[in-house]
Image (cartoon, grey):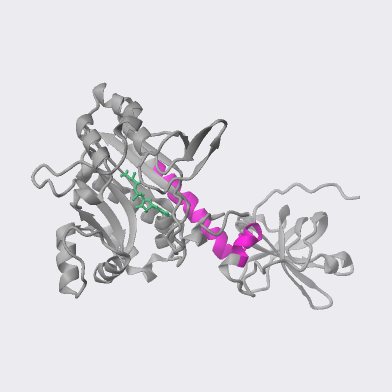
Amino acid sequence: MKETIKRTHFAKELEENLLGHKVNVGGWIEDIRDIGKIIFLVIKDITGPIQVIVDPEEFPQIRDIPRQSSILLSGKLQKSKAKEMKVELKLEEIGDIYHSNHPLPIDPTGRLESAIDKRLDARALDLRNENVSKLFIIRSIALEIIRKTLREMYFIEVNTPKIIGSASEGGANLFEFDYFTNKAYLAQSPQLYKEQLVLALDRVFEIAPYFRAEKSNTVRHLTEFYSVDIEAAFLDYYDIMEIMERVIKNVIIGIKDSGLIDFTKNEFIKNAIETKFERLTYQACIEELKENGDRVEYGDDLSDSSLRKLGQLHPGFYFITGWPLKLKPFYILENEKDHFLSDSFDLQIGYLELISGGSRQHDPSKIRNRLAEQGLNPDKFSEHLKVFDWGMPPHAGCGLGLDRLMMCLTGSMNVREVVLYPRDPYRISP
Ligand code: AMO
């Protein structure tokens, strides 16, 4: 019985300065090449591969360990004869082995491709493919940068309830469930809470999952998605656009600096760092669409096909401002000069909506009217509306679809690629 080996180094840390040293590594067996006198073992951890040179006379049992098993090894670091790597490990001791049972549902080395559904069914194993795990390292970097950028601007990170007693946004897309003897819902957004919080906390942000009971089976819709919501007192929607442009640019810079994505191949993302995001009015979009043969009329929402056309004309990041008020939720402020319009914006990348936001209506009687206009019962919002009588400052905010942002920054074709365990109308497991 061998003593358990404790890992001393990750693959990435095995550099020439450790040549001749004994190191302990842990990972999974990616490959075994048996050429008779030597066995080449490739083990991988989250930081990369390690080539291990095995003497089969000393360790014949290596031949029987199935690929993808996890293993702890100890050995001496030596110069590698292979051109593509500087160092390799000469095996001296085998520690614990955690066997994988074959056949495995997918091949995580990527040599044998599997459809996304099959990969999602075996997500934990799928993540052993470095092209897949990379997406979640990038997501983690993005989250860190978003938090840092917002904190630098005095935003406080908050956590609001996801089990709620009534709708926050209105509309029919709420998940309802039994809550003891009552009904409760899963939050569609933190909208009401984040607005209330600016009363005292001034600037808040929340990064959390939200739930929409929409039967949209597309590559950009999920029933549970992550949103970066911000809300700030004494700012208007133009200020929020500036803040979010800075957040996204910082995220792109951070990902670029990590070296994990080569943005030189994606000119829209690459250019986004240096150029100001384009700003279009809703009216200009309608005119442009009509000039290009679209049947849309002023006042209409932009359908999927209109957005796709617009996306072809503006493939990079662009804001659309000044939407008709009737298309926006009850909490959006109406434009002072043109009552048909609202002080709102969306941020698009091509056809894809990434952010929606605006200045907020902070006159409670007007919010009541807007609620009624939209077929919602103002009395059900009294808990929320009472806060507006306690000295509510003017405020503005927005929600950024994090999964969609990651989808476009990583060049993924399906939002499910950048979500560990996606939820959609047809998938609630694993
Ligand atoms: P909205 O409903 O537009 O706005 O949502 C904000 C952003 O969240 C993303 N998003 C989604 N992503 C994946 N799947 C979905 N089903 C989904 N739905 C929305 C989009 C969208 O732009 N309360 C407002 C925000 C605000 O005004 O502060 C809101 O929720 O990228």
Where residue 114 sits, quadrant-wise, is bottom right
Where residue 90 sits, quadrant-wise, is bottom right
Q: Of 73 and 267, which appears nearest the observer? A: 267
Q: Note whether 293 is above or below 23 in the view shown.
A: below
Quadrant of the snapshot with the C terminus: bottom right
> Do we see residue 128 in this rendering?
no
> What main secondary structure does the magenta stretch of the protein show?
helix
- Left or right of 79 in this view: 340: left
Please say whether residue 122 is one of the residues in the magenta stretch. Answer: yes
Q: Position of residue 45 (x, y in %)?
A: 65, 57
Q: Position of residue 154 (x, y in %)?
A: 32, 33
Most extreme residue toward the left is 337
> Do we see residue 114 in this rendering?
yes
Most extreme residue toward the right is 1
Q: Position of residue 240 (x, y in %)?
A: 26, 44
- Left or right of 414 in this view: 320: left
Query: Which span of residues is magenta-colored?
Result: 118-147
Q: Of 250 and 232, which appears nearest the observer? A: 232
Where residue 126 sits, quadrant-wise, is bottom right
Q: How many marks?
A: 0
Please say whether residue 22 is one of the residues in the magenta stretch. Answer: no
Most extreme residue toward the top is 390
Going 27% across and 67% down the picture, which residue do you hit? 306
Going 34% across and 52% down the picture, which residue do you hit? 248
Q: Of 160 and 54, which appears nearest the observer? A: 160
- Left or right of 400 in this view: 19: right
Q: Position of residue 105 (x, y in %)?
A: 70, 66
